[in-house]
Image (cartoon, rainbow, N blue to C red):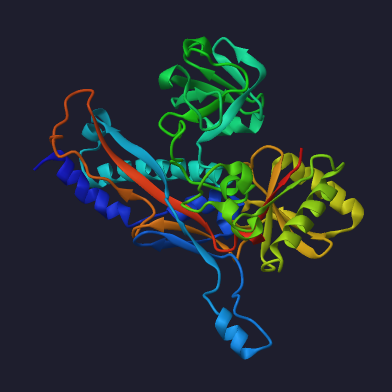
Amino acid sequence: MTYSAALAGLLRQISGNDKFEEQLRKKDPIFARMKMKSITGEPLLHVETGRSPGGSATGSVAKANASLAARTKFVLSPGRDFQALSLSDYDLKGAREPGAIKSLMEAEKDTAERSIADSLSMGLYRDGHGVRGNIATGGISSATITLANPRDALNFFEGMKVVFSELRGGALRDSGATLTVLRTDPSAGTVTFTANVSTISGVVAGDFIYRHGDAAAGGTRKLFIGAQGWFADPASDGGAFYGVTRTNFSRHTVAGTVSNQASTVNTYDKLYNGIEAILAASGNGGSNNKVLAVPSNYFLALAKEADNRNVVVDKASKGEFGHRRMVISFGSADVEVVLSYHCVADQAVLFDMDMVELWYLGDKMVAPMVIDDSAQWQLADGENWQCQYSSYCVLAPKAPSTCGRIVLA
C-alpha cells in the first residue's frame, strides 16, 4: 500500500471534524456575527437596483408600463487560499502508529485553518488585490522595512515570501522576485527579511507588499474581496466588478457609501457623521442589526469620548469569542461598535449583519486536495509528505447600500 493512500484514509477521518468556521469567528468580530453558508454551482448575487416602473393611478397606464423590477446579477468569483500541510519523515517515523500520525495531521490541519482564517480576516476589509501593507516614507534600511501602518506587521509571518509593486494591483517589481520574512515587530511596525531589500530591483518607499502568489499584477483579483471592493466609489473602482459595470446604475444601489470624515475633529463626530451619511444614502437604513468595526486606536478614543458625552448604551466589554465591543448611541441609531485588528488604517466599516453573508463552495469550507500517490510508505531521509487544504469564499452583501466605509484620517 502506498504511503499517501494510507494517509488519505486518515485525512478523510479528520476532515469531517471541521473547526474552520470557529477559527474564523475567533479571528474577527464581524465574522463572529456573520451568517455563513455552503453553496453549490455558480454563486450568483441578485441585487435590487430600482423599483418596478409599472405604477400609475390609471390601471391601463400601469399595465402598459409594467416590467420586471430592476435587478442586476453579480457573478461572484470566490477568493482562493491554499495552505500546504507537511509532515517530515522524522515526525512520521517517530509516530509509527496511525493514531499518532492522525494527531500530527490534525495539528497541521488546525494550523492551516488558522492561516486561512488570518488571510480571510485581513481580506474582509480590503479589495482582493492582495496588499498586506506598504512601505512608509524613509522606511527602508538594509534588510528591514517600516510599514506605513504599523498594525500591518500582523499580516506577515516568519518564512513568508513576499513581492512588491509600485501601484496597488500593478506590475510586480523585478519580474516578481521574492524576499523571505525573517521576523516582524508589530510594536515598531517593521518587517525584517533574510536579505537586503535592495536585492529586489526598484523597491522604494510607498511600494505595496503582497504574499507570493497573491498579487493580481494587473489581472483578475485572486483573493477574497471585502469592504474596500464592495463599499467603494464605482467611478474610481475601475471597470466591471464581478461582471457588473457599476457606473451604469445609481451608485447607492450597487455599492456601499464611502463617507470621508478626515477633516472632522474628534472620533465620535467622525463616526456619527459617517453613519448618518451611510443611512441616508441607503434610503431605508436597512436593518437594526448594524455593527461598526473600527481600528484599535479609534475604539479606545471613542470609548472615552462617548462616556464623556453620556451616549454609552452598553459599556465596553468582551463579547463572544473574546472580541471587544460596546454599544453607542449615534443619533438615529444605537450601533454595536467592535474592535478589529484587521481594519485598514484610519477606516471604519459599517456592516448590516442581516444583509451580509459569507458563502463558500462545497460541503466544507476547507477540503483536502489530491495527495501525490507516488510517495511511498517509507519516505527517504529528509523527504516530507505534503497535501493541501483550500478555501473558496466570497462576501455576499445582498443589499450593499445598507453598508459603508468611513474614512477617518
| Residue at the farthest bottom position | 59
For the N terminus, the image quarter is: top left
Left or right, 243 with respect to 277, comes to: left
**163 or 97: which is nearer to us?**
163
Q: Horizontally, is 369 left or right of 291 in the view?
A: left
Asked if one can make out residue 342 in the rendered structure from this viewpoint, the answer is no
Q: Is residue 224 left or right of residue 99?
A: right
Residue 241 percent location from the top left of the image? 51, 49
Q: Which of the two residues, 89 or 144, is positioned nearer the viewer here?
A: 144
Position of residue 340 in the picture relative to residue 387 (left or right): right
**Closer to the camera in the image, 213 or 3:** 213
- The residue lying at 56 percent from left, 27 percent from top is 167
Q: Is residue 206 above or below residue 44?
A: above
Q: Position of residue 47 (x, y in %)?
A: 54, 64
Residue at the spot x=15%, y=45% of the render? 5
Label count reads 0
**Residue 288 lies in what quarter of the image?**
bottom right
Residue 42 image-quadrant placement: bottom left
Residue 377 at what x, y percent from top left?
A: 13, 36
Residue 92 appears in the picture as rendered: yes
Look at the picture and state if 405 lies above or below 58. above
Give the percent coordinates (x, y) of residue 353.
Answer: 61, 62
Among the 4 quarters of the image, the one containing residue 190 = top right
Quarter of the picture holding the C terminus: top right
Please say if 379 is above or below 300: above
For the point 50% across and 45% down, the residue is: 120
Q: Residue at x 70, y 43 (%)?
A: 347
Residue furthest out toward the left: 1
From this viewpoint, which residue is outermost toward the right?
309
